Amino acid sequence: MSRKKHTSNSKRSREKARQARREAREVREMLKMPVDSRRGVNRRAAENRRRFRRGLLWLTGLTALAVAGWALFHKAFYDNPEFLLKHVEVLNDGTLTKQEILQTAQIPSKINLLEIDLKAIDTNLRSRSQVRDVRVKRKVPDTLEIMVWERTPVAWLGYQGGDLDKRQEGILLDAEGIAICCHTLYREFYDFPVILIPREMIEEFVIYGEKVDLPSVEAALELVHLWPMEPHLHPNLHLAQIDASRHYRLTVDCLPETQLVFLPENLRGQLIKLGDTIRHGERQNRYFAKVDLTVADNIPVIYHDANFAPALEAPADAIEQQPAPRWQPRSPWNHQLSEQDLENIVNIDS
């Protein structure tokens, strides 16, 4: 009886296992899942290993080809003496000399043309406040071209009580109000007017290569720009100094011995009034010592004495036209490039 009962239990267990397998098969067929055998799994694993080994061999071969190609390229160009830097073409539109540009650029000596860091040269040149824009490019096989566009100064920036004759250390301004360090004093700079502001403002607002963000300085530069455009001003009346220390007025000293007072706004209209006033004085054969243009009507004026005679302007041929450098920067711009190195590797083509 016991044996018969055990056989019956085993049969039921086998039946349950078969039923479970049938249900699992039905579920896989419903989900479209492949039925994998152990042999199929092993076959796919072996195939994957073979694919991995083939891919590794291809990668090793391509790496070897790339290394060999780079070695050939490096030998053909970087190790080729024909690509050694021999000529530097310097083109600029201002007062910087080619020597100053080369020293500022800091070009290494005995270097391959392809190894030159153009971005570093560009950054070095732009660090000089005189430089407005730069373009540096290679010209194979052995030439480097540097093109520099400079800022054009129109006025000096000084402070009240300062010694304005020491302009070799002065601050120049271009028409946009960007501060320029005067490294070399040229003859044409002498005629620029001087804009005066308090000394503490120079220490606070003036950064070389950046705009002087002061409304009074902007108004003074606008006056410098508009002055030669007014047709009724006497040609011998020159701007010498503009006191822009007060935000509500500009006090202008002109040559010969004339003082003008402007409001910072509507400068063009005030210049027209000044031209009318000068014509009125010429009809009376009188010269003005002071004109206050801040008044809308009945402009207050002060005349010179009747025997006053302005100094005549020097003839154009009596003025030296060639720029004459007065000094050099206190420290050299480039400590790596000596004069001998320049002579050895640099040929400046004009």
Image (spheres, rainbow, N blue to C red):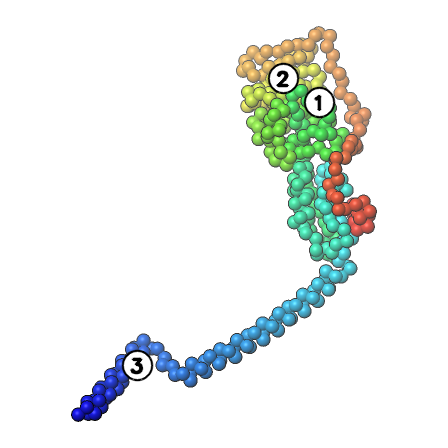
The residue that mark 2 highlights is: 260
Residue placed furthest toward the top = 306
Task: Give the mark nearest the N terminus, 1 or 3.
Answer: 3
In percent of width and height, residue 180 lies at 67, 34
Read off the residue under disc 1. 163
Image point (67%, 69%), residue name? 68
Q: Amino acid at mark 1?
A: Asp
> Residue 1, image x and y in percent?
17, 92
Q: Position of residue 340 (x, y in %)?
A: 82, 47
| Residue 184 x %, y % | 74, 33
Which one is in front, 36 or 115? 36
Q: Secondary structure at mark 1?
A: loop
**Residue 25 has which mark?**
3
Secondary structure found at label 3: helix
> Of residues 213 and 236, which is closer to you in this image?
213
Circle 2: element type: strand
Q: Quarter of the image holding residue 155?
A: top right
Nearest-to-viewer mark from 1 and 3: 3
Precedes in sequence: disc 1 or disc 2 = 1
Q: Quick one: quadrant of the C terminus? A: top right
Question: In percent of the image, x 69 and y 27: which residue is there?
Answer: 192
